[in-house]
Image: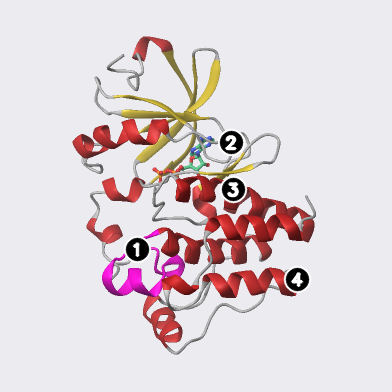
Amino acid sequence: KEDQWEVDPEELTLGQELGSGQFGLVLDGTWRERKVAVKMIREGCMSDEDFKEEARVMMRLSHGRLVQLYGVCTQQSPMCLVFEFMENGSLSDYLRDRRGRLSPELMLVMCLDVSEGMAYLESSFFIHRDLAARNCLVSKNNEVKVSDFGMTRFVLDDQYTSSQCSKFPVKWSAPEVIKYCKFSSKSDVWAFGVLMWEVYNEGRLPYENRTNAEVVESLNAGLRLLKPRLAPDDVYLLMEWCWKEKPDDRPSFAHLLHQLASLSNL
Ligand code: ADP
């Protein structure tokens, strides 16, 4: 069928506001007896035509550790995107709200969940480009899933798209991304190392009191984020491996998944 990704607005019921992000408001809702999250795309902040092309690819990505895109509603303005509903919200808020109450064992499982989703994206040759705790969501069973994969390509705000600019996620970016905008699964691996650091620091922001320029300078000098108090040595070794200067020296997600699984004795 041709328009499989098109959601019929008649079948969609909108509810309460869940939050807002880069593209506008996010509402909860119901679609075909399922609870969903609906992103209402604000006028002028997304390259719609490019996104519609890509939505077909994104809808084919399907894995238990990815937040599923169910479909898009493009007939009306604003356009909206319909996603799997994640009861426990973003991973960064989840971690902050539970400070002092999460065990390092649970933190390891969260990292393992994300590595599973990312290993699937890697094997699908799909680059996330903006992996961070704020772009992962937590289900009602406390499983962590990867969200917002590939979406930064459709942001029209210049402040977000150039590494020189204020909203660019420099603190999660590999050196080759900062220097040449060279994204790859290996630059996702760098970001995953920072995400692990966020998890073991209970949702604290990396390089909290430093500007982007200062972060770039310390990375160039070979410095890296310090070991979180709650992180075991073997977990910090994995983080440091993700932050190797050369992309080829970093592990793959397949390998990280394997390592994290053996650390968690699953
Ligand atoms: P954007 O992609 O536009 O930047 P976000 O993904 O950051 O938007 O979403 C903003 C907020 O909406 C999140 O912090 C979260 O609280 C909520 N949200 C987004 N997607 C979902 C979802 N699938 N299920 C539940 N809540 C969600």
Which image quarter: residue 160?
A: bottom left
| Residue 41 visible from this viewpoint | no
- Under circle 4, the secondary element is loop
Amino acid, disc 2: Gly
Determine which of the numbered discs, if any, sits on residue 200 in the image. none
Which image quarter: residue 212?
A: bottom left
Q: Residues within 10 Å of mark 1 (few under 14, many from 20)?
A: some
| Residue 179 counted in the magenta span | yes
Distance from the alpha carbon under mark 3 to that under mark 1: 26 Å
Up/down of 247 relative to 141, above or below: below
Marks 2,3: beta carbons within 8 A? yes
Q: How crowded is mark 4: few (under 14 residues within 10 Å), some or many (20 or more)?
A: few
Q: Report the residue marked by disc 4.
A: 232
Which label's residue is closer to the chain start, 3 or 4? 3
Up/down of 221 relative to 35, above or below: below
**Residue beneath the point at 65% across and 56% down:** 258
Which label's residue is closer to the chain start, 2 or 3? 2
Distance from the alpha carbon under mark 2 to that under mark 1: 29 Å
Q: Give the range drawn in magenta.
A: 169-184
**Residue beneath the point at 42% across and 55% down:** 130
Which label's residue is closer to the chain start, 3 or 1? 3
Distance from the alpha carbon under mark 3 to that under mark 4: 20 Å
Determine which of the numbered discs, if any, sits on residue 168 in the image. 1
Which label's residue is closer to the chain start, 2 or 1? 2
Of the two numbered discs 1 and 4 in the rendering, the one whose residue sits closer to the viewer? 4
Marks 3,4: beta carbons within 8 A? no
| Residue 231 counted in the magenta span | no
Q: Report the residue marked by disc 2.
A: 64
Q: Report the residue marked by disc 3.
A: 116
Q: Where is residue 217 in the image (x, y as percent from the top left)?
A: 40, 85
